[in-house]
Image (tube, grey):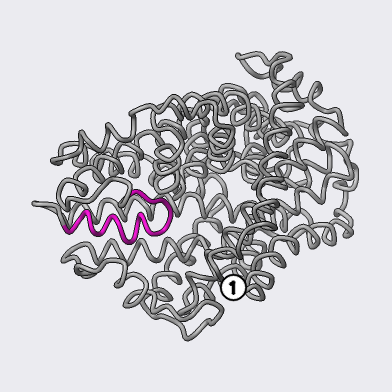
Amino acid sequence: MQNRSQWGTRLGFLLAAMGSAIGLGNIWRFPATAYENGGGAFFVPYLFALLTAGIPLLIMEYTIGHKYRGSAPKSLGRVSKGFEWIGWWQVLISFVISTYYGAIIAWAIMYSYYSFGQVWGDDTTGFFTGDFLQMTDAGAFGGLVPTILIPLIIVWVLVLGILLAGVKKGIELANKIFIPLLAVLFLIIVIRAVTLPGAAEGLNEFFQPNWSEIMNGSVWVAAYGQIFFSLSIGFAIMITYSSYLSKKSDITNNAFITGFGNSSFELLAGIGVFGALGFMAQSTGQEFTEIVQGGVMLAFSVFPQIINEMPVMSGLFGFLFFASLTLAGLSSLISISETYVAGVQEKFNVSRTASVLIGGGIAAVISIAYASQGGLVLLDTVDYFINNYGVALAGLFEVVAVAWFARGLKDLQNHANSVSDIQLGGWWRFCLGFITPIVLGYMMLQNIRNEVTGEPYEGYPIEFLFNFGWIVALGAMMLGAVITIKRWPNRDLDYKRHSSVETSEDKEVAQ
């Protein structure tokens, strides 16, 4: 039996886990979410959500992967045979996300280049949607855009090359380069941002607490949503990554380090973004509410405007910002892709090389659709539905299945406590058995209610939303159930046989 791949060091695992968690959403989602939900007051529900949902869920997924030593489908199938489909559902969600994530990285690469000379000109929004993306009407794909297609191909060649190199020599080595470099680049951005004229006013807007919002239920839901989506929970990533840990790795401590490391970067991102926005507000005379926004437009429309206004070294600032987006995106794309590489390799009993080329190759080919003139609308639609009706729903199913139906929390708690310095108690089971399912369930009901009672998402054609939104989100769930029908090869059929045999590699303790 072939030995399972393993991280070379504990640091390598932590950097890879944080590289997965620290993605594009940390930079362009968190600052706007905090600002719109009470400013400094938002940090109270945010910290509460981190401690009652984020870290407990991380511990659960780390423990499942570490105990059952397999990809998400295999590990969840070993928790209970009927749960394998949840693992495949999560893997397919990650597959869908990987198809469009590369396109955003391709945009960031091009904007890194455009920063020197501010190629986008004065009308940054018009340049992004018109000159760069060459957008067509919603629902039409149009032709391919070479300035997106070429960097997209480069992204996939790099990512597939790293995955082909394996866990230790590929993923771990890449994250040992990407994450420290990302930290240094973003720290330089933050230092420059907070020294700009008007930065103090921007930071005051970010940190000024609006305590009246604390009693608003939607603020608490936003806090849990931010934690859930930013920690890579429910994507099959953390189960897969933790399955490569050595037998004596400290699970609970690793989860706390990952959780607080991710949140620290989000706070740093908020400081950098709002320092820069404060400068822009002062330079242009605009009200703060007019310029604060999140998502794609913050990065590719608002930030180029900020770069235009900078007095000195504007090109370098722009390059550092978009290079940071590129690094954050690459580390996340690698982790997302590893979920289906591991799943296909184990389920279909093929080599890692074949799994990377099949799974990654198909994702790369599909991603070409996002390099078309209709790529932004397609990306926006798929991202909205796969996150709201894929990731959140799959996470809810996972925690309810393990906590309520398998009644496996006590067993997982004993396993985590046997290798961890920080011991888990009844609080951990209470958080996963009650708090997390209630919050995720409420989020899901809110999403469905808004979908039924509101206007079509972004005013896009209903047929387009159905074909590339609902069908993609629900298709991932149904296809996951279909893949489950195929039997596992060889000894993997025995779900009760998991970690009874230690390999020579397992006896190594990660330093």
Which residue in the rendered view is the most extreme toward the bottom? Answer: 143
Q: In the figure, 43 relative to 103: above or below?
A: above
Would you say 264 lies left or right of 499 here? left
The spot of residue 310 in percent (x, y) is 14, 52
The amino acid at mark 1 is Ile
Would you say 8 lies left or right of 199 here? right
Q: Which residues are magenta?
A: 292-308
The spot of residue 196 in percent (x, y) is 15, 41
- Answer with the quarter of the image where residue 318 lies: bottom left
- Answer with the quarter of the image where residue 344 lies: bottom right
Q: Which residue is mark 1?
A: 366
Most foreground residue, 482 or 452: 452
Would you say 472 lies left or right of 254 here? right
**Kind of element beneath mark 1:** helix
Q: Residue shown at 69%/20% (left/top)? A: 428
Please identify the dominant SS of the magenta region. Answer: helix
Number of labels in the image equals 1
Q: Residue shown at 67%/76% (left/top)? A: 463
Most foreground residue, 251 or 256: 256
